[in-house]
Image: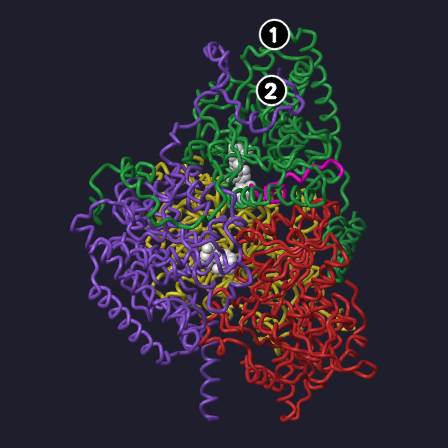
Chain colours: A purple, B red, C green, D yellow
């Protein structure tokens, strides 16, 4: 039967041959050599995601009053988020932002990630996630400071418990794990929510962070916004996995798949994961299926790498429209409610526009102020050099 | 690897570049008809295309290099012309990109790897240091690593954090790597071709703020380029020598022009390859002028200028009238866009340093 | 029903809630918003490993003549491999090797990995895998050059199609992927077999290599020798996964679990994976459960971190003993056959000992010979300096 | 960060070390009773223990630091004493280790991270460069990074490939990091305590071949250590100054002893912290002697000595009778054990360099 040469049978069959199928031998198990136990046994079943993304919109589920309020709040924030994205993009055209990576189409993920957290929790955003930070309560001007270019991080991360927007992809994930682990060691029931893109999951840091989190049972929720692209590279060139959520089992944590444009569904899945993490259940990997409606940034030309029809198909699954339609169908949203949401968004946009039109105050001396706790002798010399230059320039004027 | 006499290298000079051009190696000289101007980005693109057409072993790979043609469009059209296997979009993982390139080189291919920005090459650091730079040595030459690692580097483009690093010091300090950086359109073509043809790994640093700078270079008949390993005197001069490379060349040429008003005749040397270093050309120049300033964007402390100043002093000590000075980026993380102008070595800072060459050093209290 | 607050139900139940279970809503699927297709659908089922490691020893399977010859050859090589490990360890005591990381207890993996490959294939060993290289036909003296210390790689990798022994863990995995991918692009049906330890699977390079391999469908077989430890760190501190083989599904490749001390089983699983890779089926991740019987290296003291009983339990599952017992039970091995195998091993050991007792020829000039294709002016100066020093020293003697 | 006057630092001198000891900062001086000798490894272990006992925020983490106590036993006993949470074995992933340490620091802890060997710190390079060194700057001081990154470095122990790198040039070229390396048992204790107490990230390089070197240091009452940022004159002298650090200090002291036979009185300076650099002490010394040689194991080209030579020349030019020379590892990948003795700067190579200081430079042809 057994032969050293490659078997003639088609591979799939051969691969499927398993110990369990070796029925004639099962009887003799007692005498068959078996390795000593080498690992605690974990059932992989509950760690595997469902094949279809979890959805709530369009279901007949009745909403209790709290849920109604939640859905309405989600809606108001989605409307605000959409407007924010538009306004920020407009600011790039006016030269007020160096660049803007829009989350248009991904607002449900951004808003739900922020809302799933308690005040004491931490958010670890990626460079595209300024809206999540804003939805967590950060002043949009502060959120956009990095992209305006007056400083790298425009806010105090400790004040808002929002880590700096991370430009090097996936590098923020181990930070989230370390912070959550530290909080747990100190007895604080703080949860960290770490955001990353589909492209970012290919980085080694993604792997190392998830592995550390699972081994340490750190209270972290990893939210992958799978928006179909890493700049121009489509998902199929990024991974061959059945889903990104399937990576979770390889770390020993649950993987969940959710419709990222279904705001109540994203909120529920994330809230459950946060709850689980807070109660000692360890980390969860959530993959939200969504789409980057705009180009990568205002500087990108998306027509070079994707057909317009694909974008149109996703426009039909717009997170703002979906929730608005559902709320109206359920008679939870009136024209007036919708107008109020739009007005609030408009007000935010106007305020943002006005404040971004002012030139930021710049202090060249700041270049040397925060390199170390105190300046080294070398930096003191260099600061003096710059100061002398600036004085000379002023004198010349 | 060959260095030539300083005389010959010094002969390859041109007038200073007008603002907006990178320098001058392709100014229409006698016997060469004026060519349509080309950008450095176009020259790099053309070099890749010609290398791929000439040698089927040349494979281009990286993030977004396929359909998009790279975020700077340096690989534009290559996937369409040579197929997606020859110009391949990879998953987003820099260590994986360089690591698989190592394996491809082991099988005889000649990978040209694009890193999207300077700071995004850091995840590939271990593969670069522990393998790319050492594989030939480890195997006594059995496994050479003909890999070209293209990295857009430097600031001045208003990029947000991590998009403006000058990381050449890391690569210079790594034996086994060549470190190359063009400053002119002609060299962008010539040095990239030579780097791809090299049987050793080359870190090819592209000064991203010069991508759109133009020179009158005919890409249909690219000019002969000085060999690898040779520095070129871009502007002859007698008062002092400015030693620079990449993005700082146009700034130095501008400074040299400005210095004329003060009656100073500054020489400007473009190093072109930081490793190997052209001691011959540079020392000959400095022995002639007796004064030198090294100019670069990278931070000063333990930066490229340290090596240049140290070796010049070792080799030309008794010809120096003043210490070799350095004008470099400050020893700080690269600043945000709105403050970068204060960080980058500009004409005034260079001229201030030149001023300090004329007198007893102010440091010798 | 739905509430924004964390649900009261215990987490596991909540987590298990899935789209499929939302029966009342299933009827209305037609009208429920669903995301457009975002990915080709892969069935994760066949990618998942069996819960128990695949085994062959102790089964009643009849062996055809080719299989008998294979099992005997495996046995002879195991005996040789065990002796090789002992001899190399002894050489450290005699100061002839700087250090030796023994594969005692893991010989079945080492030998099977080598035998599963054709001549045109490539082996990518880790620092512990000199035996796999030797079993592939490399002269043991060459295999041990790195550990003796006269050069980094003592052989020509192209000649033997054995990559240099990799000291930085997991870094050789992307090399294997790149080589296999290149071979495939050039139309060669070459397979790469890449070896890594359980500890090495935590490195980012492991993740990136497997992902590249799956996306490119590169003909690579990844063999993880899970020997329970990364130096002193036990598996449970390395990963919380149900098994390392479960990581495969997250890349979209099959994961297989095999008893790493059951030589015929390892050989079969690897051969199938090699066959599959060669025929365009893409990569496979194989986890072999085994045990590092010796300390990490001769310099390590394993009693600091593991109990003797654990080692004893694994000694009872010794790969050499298991196969010998099975072959004798099946009357395939006589005392004479066993003696012949032992004699051949002794001969190898004697030859190795003798040759390692000779001092290697050293040429200090070699320091500069292979840094670049040709020496830079700087290296020429430095070589001259060293030559002058050596001459001065000689003159002084 | 404070530098003190050269006079005070120069006062802290001792006689040259006997072979087998690291140097001499703890030789029994007047008023100090002779202490039982301790090794550098023991001093480091004690420093960790004392820091952990004093501040519950100090967490030690890395590969094999728990039950095993580290492959060099520097963390021996810490897990037993402080629990596995305070001295934690991590999964085998250096970027993950340093990356999680960043998060722990964000939450107020003070992580002390061990990398097992120099070359195995490279996978953590991106986290180090892009985050550890810049987090304070990025957040205007809101998120300081009080991380100590311990890295055993250097050769001379017969280690196989990747176990003997001197990687300090990479770290020195990175603004935002402190780079510290003890050369004596006393400094191993004192500098490690100061590094852990620092609110800024410190790359703490441990010269692994000095781990077992002994000095008469009483670890129960560790001697006062010179402050962070200050270089120390380990041997006063008048003829020329040897500037060194870490593993090369004993070699330089030996060379200075040997030079006495030639009638030369060499001064030896131990830098202790490469960043910040103690310009004051070093310049004062070089101005006094007028001649200097920088000695280190790291490769020479773009190595630490380049910065030291360049800045000394900038600051002391008119006091120099000869160029500052460098004695360094060759510009090659670290060689295999049997050849490393040819690579490492030894007494003869140092004395040859000193010889070259006496005459007109041979380079000035
Ligand atoms: C380590 C690193 N490599 C490369 C980049 C350049 N880059 C910026 S965004 C991007 C694509 C990111 O894709 P994804 O993770 O899917 O996030 P998305 O942009 O879709 O939100 C790339 C390659 C980077 N920022 N960091
Ligand atoms: C990148 C890297 N980090 C750390 C080390 C140091 N080191 C050598 S072997 C080892 C443990 C390896 O464990 P595993 O991968 O399980 O292989 P095994 O030793 O069990 O064969 C470590 C940490 C290394 N060689 N490379
Ligand atoms: Mg994406
Ligand atoms: Mg292991």
Answer left or right for C396 relative to A56: right
Answer left or right for D132 relative to C26: right
Q: Position of residue D198 (x, y in %)?
A: 38, 59
Q: Which residue is mark 1?
A: C330
Q: Position of residue D56 (x, y in %)?
A: 30, 48
**Which chain does tag 2 point to?**
C
Which of the 4 quarters of the picture holds residue C210? top right
**Among numbered discs 2 and 1, the one appearing first in the sequence:** 2
Q: Nearer the viewer, residue D134 or D69?
A: D134
Q: Which residue does the image show at 61% across and 86% down from the upper left? A: B359
Label 1: few (<14), some (14–19) or many (≥20) C-alpha neighbours in 10 Å: some
Residue C160 located within the stretch drawn in magenta: yes
Q: Position of residue C176 (x, y in %)?
A: 63, 41
Same chain assignment for discs 2 and 1? yes
Q: Which residues are magenta?
A: C159-176
**Which chain does tag 1 point to?**
C
Quadrant in the picture for the N terminus of chain B:
bottom right
Q: Main secondary structure of the magenta part?
A: loop
Residue A192 located within the stretch drawn in magenta: no
A158 above or below D163? below
Q: Which residue does the image show at 29% across and 68% down from the upper left? A: A139
Q: Which mark is residue B227?
A: none
Is label 2 in a helix, a strand or a loop?
helix
Q: Nearer the viewer, residue D297 or B232?
A: B232
Q: Which residue is mark 2?
A: C264
Q: CA distance from mark 2 to mark 1?
A: 14 Å
């Amino acid at each position: 039967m057994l032969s050293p040469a490659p078997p003639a049978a088609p591979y799939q069959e051969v691969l499927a041959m398993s110990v369990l199928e070796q029925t004639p031998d099962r009887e003799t198990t007692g005498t068959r050599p078996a390795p000593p136990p080498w690992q605690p046994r974990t059932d992989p079943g509950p760690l595997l995601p469902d094949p279809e993304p979890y959805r709530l919109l369009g279901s007949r589920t009745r909403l209790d009053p709290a849920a109604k309020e939640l859905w309405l709040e989600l809606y108001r924030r989605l409307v605000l988020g959409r407007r924010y994205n538009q306004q920020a993009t407009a600011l790039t055209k006016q030269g007020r932002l160096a660049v803007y990576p829009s989350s248009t189409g991904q607002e449900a993920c951004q808003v739900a990630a922020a809302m799933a957290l308690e005040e004491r929790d931490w958010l670890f955003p990626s460079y595209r996630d300024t809206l999540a930070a804003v939805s967590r309560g950060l002043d949009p001007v502060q959120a956009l400071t990095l992209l305006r270019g007056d400083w790298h991080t425009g806010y105090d991360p400790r004040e808002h418990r929002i880590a700096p927007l991370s430009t090097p992809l996936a590098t923020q994930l181990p930070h989230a794990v370390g912070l959550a682990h530290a909080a747990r060691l100190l007895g604080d029931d703080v949860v960290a929510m770490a955001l990353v893109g589909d492209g970012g999951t290919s980085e080694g840091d993604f792997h190392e962070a998830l592995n550390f989190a699972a081994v340490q049972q750190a209270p972290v929720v990893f939210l992958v916004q799978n928006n179909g692209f890493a700049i121009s590279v489509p998902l199929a060139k990024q991974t061959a996995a059945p889903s990104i959520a399937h990576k979770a089992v390889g770390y020993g944590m649950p993987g969940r798949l959710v419709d990222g444009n279904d705001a109540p569904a994203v909120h529920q899945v994330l809230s459950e994961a946060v709850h689980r993490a807070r109660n000692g259940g360890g980390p969860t990997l959530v993959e939200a299926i969504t789409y980057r409606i705009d180009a990568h940034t205002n500087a990108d030309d998306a027509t070079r790498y994707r057909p317009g029809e694909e974008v149109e198909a996703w426009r039909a699954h717009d997170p703002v429209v979906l929730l608005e339609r559902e709320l109206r169908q359920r008679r939870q949203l009136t024209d007036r409610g919708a107008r109020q949401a739009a007005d609030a968004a408009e007000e935010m946009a106007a305020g943002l526009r006005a404040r971004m039109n002012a030139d930021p105050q710049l202090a060249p001396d700041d270049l040397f102020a925060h390199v170390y706790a105190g300046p080294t002798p070398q930096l003191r010399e260099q600061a003096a050099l710059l100061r002398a230059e600036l004085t000379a320039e002023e004198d010349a004027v | 690897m060959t260095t030539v006499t300083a005389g010959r290298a010094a002969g390859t000079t041109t007038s200073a570049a007008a603002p907006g051009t990178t320098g001058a190696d392709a100014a229409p000289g006698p016997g060469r008809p004026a060519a349509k101007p080309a950008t450095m980005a176009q020259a790099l693109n053309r070099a890749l295309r010609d290398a791929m057409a000439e040698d089927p072993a040349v494979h281009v790979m990286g993030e977004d290099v396929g359909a998009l043609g790279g975020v700077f469009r340096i690989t534009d059209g290559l996937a369409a012309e040579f197929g997606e296997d020859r110009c391949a979009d990879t998953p987003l993982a820099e260590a994986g990109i360089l690591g698989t390139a190592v394996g491809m080189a082991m099988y005889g291919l000649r990978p040209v790897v694009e890193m999207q920005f300077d700071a995004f090459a850091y995840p590939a650091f271990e593969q670069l240091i522990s393998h790319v730079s050492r594989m030939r040595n480890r195997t006594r030459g059995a496994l050479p690593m003909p890999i070209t690692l293209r990295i857009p580097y430097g600031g001045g483009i208003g990029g947000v954090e991590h998009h403006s690093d000058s990381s050449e010091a890391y690569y210079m300090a790594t034996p086994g790597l060549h470190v190359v950086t063009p400053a002119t359109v002609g060299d962008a073509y010539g040095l990239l071709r030579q780097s791809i043809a090299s049987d050793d790994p080359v870190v090819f640093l592209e000064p991203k703020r010069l991508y759109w700078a133009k020179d009158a270079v005919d890409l249909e008949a690219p000019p002969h380029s000085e060999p690898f390993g040779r520095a070129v005197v871009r502007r002859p001069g007698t008062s002092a020598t400015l030693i620079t490379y990449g993005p700082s060349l146009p700034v130095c040429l501008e400074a040299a022009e400005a210095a004329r008003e003060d009656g100073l005749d500054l020489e400007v040397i473009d190093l072109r390859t930081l490793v190997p270093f052209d001691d011959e050309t540079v020392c000959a120049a400095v022995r002639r002028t007796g004064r030198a300033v090294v100019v670069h964007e990278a931070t000063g402390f333990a930066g490229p200028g340290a090596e240049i100043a140290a070796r010049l002093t070792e080799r030309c000590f008794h010809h120096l009238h003043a210490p070799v000075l350095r004008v470099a980026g400050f020893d700080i993380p690269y600043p945000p866009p709105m403050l970068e102008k204060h960080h980058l070595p500009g004409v005034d800072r260079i001229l201030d340093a030149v001023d300090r060459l004329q007198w007893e050093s102010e440091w010798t209290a």
